[in-house]
Amino acid sequence: MAGKLYLVATPIGNLSDLSPRAVQTFEEVDFIAAEDTRVSVKLLNHFGLKKPLVSYYEHNRAESGEKIIARLLAGESCALVSDAGMPAISDPGEDLVVRCAQNGIEVLAVPGPCAAVTALALSALPSGRFTFEGFLSTAKKNRAAHLDSLKNERRTMIFYEAPHKLNATLADLQAAFGGDRRISVCRELTKLHEQTLRMTIREAAAYFEQVPPRGEFVLVVEGAPEPSEPEVTLEDALAQVFALRDEGLSLKAAARQAAEATGFAKNVLYDAALGK
């Protein structure tokens, strides 16, 4: 019988955020697959846990993933962790989950911290609908195409960015969306120097030209405004009245239906149609 893969969320800064269930899962699995074993061993040591670690990251995911699947099929259980946050989200763990699905291996989640959702909650921007965009490409052409595809995106957008690329990214966001769009810049979430700045993109670009960026950033950007409805003139509304009358409606019925569609008062349209 095949083992199980557990996707275990780890703290994005504050070690106290590791859940009791995550600790229990680490204790029970046969081995842990980690993005960076040096980072994960520090976490395990903090909680007094000892467990075999294997490396699984972007550049070895094909070879390492095949070995992990073989061990799972042989009946072992594995906890997958990223350096921080939820594995398989903007993370090579996505590929391992696909492999498990293809091989009929059960995958279970041990949820916990996620930088994207944490930043969204702190942003004071609309959170009912949002889109996670992750890291922008370092290739200028791909980056430009990515941002261009989002120009009319009305949902709140979430991006990850490293400190040494922040100024260039803010400049690109301003070029794509304009300087007046609201942005929440979250830095070092749950850590000692956590900071959330709520301003316009233009103000954020100016601020970080003066203050050197430090730490890991999550950028939460306001979506595009809803397109304004074209203004309907009395002439337009009357045209609808006459068109409806030509279809066989009485003048009163046509005025009533056109009023519902245009917002004009029924009596105003009726009188105007009569030439009063």
Image: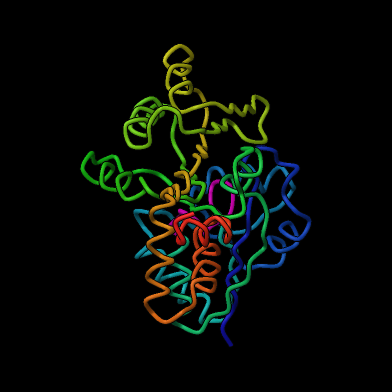
Q: Residue at x 55, y 33 (%)?
A: 184
Whether the magenta-drawn stretch holds residue 31 is answered as no
Tell which residue pokes out farthest to the left in this image.
Answer: 141
Residue 166 pos. (x, y %): 41, 28
Whether the magenta-drawn stretch holds residue 83 is answered as yes
Residue 250 pos. (x, y %): 49, 77
Quadrant housing the N terminus: bottom right
Tell which residue pokes out farthest to the bottom in this image.
Answer: 1
Question: In the image, is residue 103 above or below residue 142?
Answer: below
Q: Residue at x 49, y 45 (%)?
A: 158
Side of 112 relative to 184 (left or right): right
Question: In the image, is residue 263 above or below residue 255?
Answer: above
The colouring scheme, among rainbow, by chain, secondary structure or one colour, is: rainbow
Residue 117 pos. (x, y %): 61, 48
* Residues in magenta, as a range: 82-92
Tell which residue pokes out farthest to the front in this image.
Answer: 276
Residue 42 pos. (x, y %): 62, 42
Nearer to me, 251 or 78: 251
Question: In the image, is residue 212 above or below residue 41?
Answer: above
Question: In the image, is residue 65 above or below residue 220?
Answer: below
Q: Residue at x 46, y 50 (%)?
A: 154
Nearer to me, 160 or 44: 160
Q: Residue at x 52, y 28 (%)?
A: 215
